[in-house]
Amino acid sequence: MTPRSDITQLLHQMGEGDATAMDRLMPLVYDELRTIAQRYLRPGGATMTLDTTALVHEAYVRLVGQTSSDFEGRSHFLAVCSVIMRNLVVDFARKRKSAKRGGDAKRVTLDDHLLQVDSQAEEVLALDTALDRLEEYDPKLARVVECRYFAGLTEPETALALGISERSVRRYWTKAKALLRQFLNPENP
């Protein structure tokens, strides 16, 4: 059996209620999940204080806690993991921004590192807002961005995960990138 077929088989076993399937699945997808986590943690080139490993592990905890685990295959599983990681990073960025506004009210000296993290938290929140706007505009476009950019899926994998043609993936990807640019830079149409 190839690793991809192992993954698919384990996902089906999870869907059938096998409680140990997730533990056997994680070593097979761990490196891919770390890659997805790295994409979320470096949207502007700077790293956040949130650790890649911690993000993968927190996503694992959320996956294990799901009552429904009916994944259609590897691509669908990675797309779901990507959405979970996005939500975790956005929650972290919101907490950072809240703390910056006095939510954790501790006196600290200014540090260039803290300024960099706060700046990136704002970038993450801006990207999240842009993705939310994109989803309101057309949910299919947002799903393609999550699969292609964050999950790192290829066009064929994205097409499989979303149940659309590769041609549609290319078309949606092009349109989504243009709209995101517009949403992120409204003064430069």
Image (cartoon, rainbow, N blue to C red):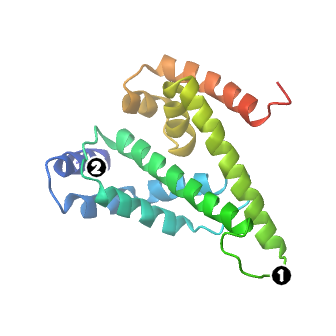
Place residue 109 in its image quadrant. bottom right
Q: Residue at x 24, y 42 (%)?
A: 70
Up-down relation of residue 173 to residue 9 (above or below): above
Q: Label 1 belongs to which residue?
A: 109
Up-down relation of residue 70 to residue 85 (above or below): above
| Residue 164 in the image, given as x and y percentages of width and height | 41, 21
User: Which label lies toward us, 2 or 1?
Assistant: 1
Whether residue 43 is visible here, answered yes or no, is: no
Q: Residue at x 69, y 57 (%)?
A: 121
Place residue 113 in its image quadrant. bottom right
Would you say the residues marked 2 and 1 are in contact, meaning their CB atoms lie under 8 Å apart? no
The numbered disc on residue 7 is: 2
Whether residue 83 is visible here, answered yes or no, is: yes
| Residue 123 in the image, given as x and y percentages of width and height | 72, 50
Q: Residue at x 68, y 26 (%)?
A: 179
Q: Amino acid at mark 2?
A: Ile
Q: Secondary structure at mark 1?
A: loop
| Residue 147 in the image, given as x and y percentages of width and height | 49, 38
Q: Nearer the viewer, residue 184 or 71?
A: 184
Q: Residue at x 75, y 28 (%)?
A: 182
Crowding at dot 2, Cα within 10 Å, few <14 / some 14-19 / many 20+, comes out as many
Up-down relation of residue 172 to residue 19 (above or below): above
| Residue 23 in the image, given as x and y percentages of width and height | 26, 64
Left/right of residue 170 with respect to residue 22 in the rendered view: right
Left/right of residue 118 with respect to residue 68 in the rendered view: right
Q: Amino acid at mark 1?
A: Thr
Q: Secondary structure at mark 2?
A: helix
Q: Nearer the viewer, residue 139 or 53?
A: 139
- Tell me how far mark 2 sits from mark 1, CA to CA: 48 Å
Q: Nearer the viewer, residue 88 or 45?
A: 88
Place residue 149 in its image quadrant. top right
**Labels 2 and 1: the sequence-earlier one:** 2
